[in-house]
Image (tube, rainbow, N blue to C red):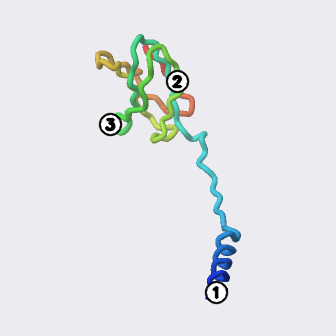
Amino acid sequence: MRKTLILTSLLALFTACGPRQVEVRTAASAADESSIHFTNNLSQAVNVYVTTDGKDLFIKQVAANTTENLAVRSVPSGTSVKLKAVTLDGGRTYAPGTDVTLSSGTTWRVP
């Protein structure tokens, strides 16, 4: 009985430590990701939004006097959108006069 238990344990050990099948995948291209190079020249932070299909999508809060690259992951490059920045107190809203076509290097600054 003891020999059977030892033999079974060794068989399980060798099976568990045997070769494994590995699946390798390639990640999606980062070049397809839309982004906004955003400069906030105001003395207070703003919330940045992208409006597509009539819905505002919050992107990020950007601190006062700061420049950041904002990734827009859920909107594909080449999409025509509206941009909006709202001060934290809600007192002012900034938007370019026309729709913007998103790309991997869209630039926008307020004011």
Q: Nearer the viewer, mark 1 or mark 2?
A: 1
Q: From the top left corner, tell me how far across and down residue 39 is, in percent.
A: 49, 18
Q: Nearer the viewer, residue 18 or 31?
A: 18
Q: Identify the mark nearer the N-term, 1 or 2.
A: 1
At x 46% / y 40%, what residue is drawn?
A: 75
Q: CA distance from mark 1 to mark 3?
A: 70 Å
Q: Nearer the viewer, residue 59 or 100?
A: 59
Furthest residue in direction top, as rendered: 43
- Secondary structure of the residue carrying tag 3 is loop
Q: CA distance from mark 1 to mark 2?
A: 66 Å
Q: CA distance from mark 3 to mark 2?
A: 25 Å
Q: Identify the mark nearer the N-term, 1 or 3.
A: 1
In what quadrant of the picture does the C terminus appear? top left
**Kind of residue indicated by mark 2:** Glu
Q: Identify the mark nearer the N-term, 3 or 2.
A: 3
Specify the label residue 4 is tagged with.
1
**Does residue 43 appear left or right of residue 6 in this picture?**
left
At x 60% / y 41%, what residue is drawn?
A: 30
- Secondary structure of the residue carrying tag 2 is strand
Q: Residues within 10 Å of mark 2 (few under 14, many from 20)?
A: some
In the image, residue 18 above or below residue 46: below
Specify the label residue 90 is tagged with.
none
Residue annotated with mark 3: 54
Q: Nearer the viewer, mark 3 or mark 2?
A: 2
Residue annotated with mark 2: 68
Q: Nearer the viewer, residue 34 or 63?
A: 63
Q: Residues within 10 Å of mark 1 (few under 14, many from 20)?
A: few
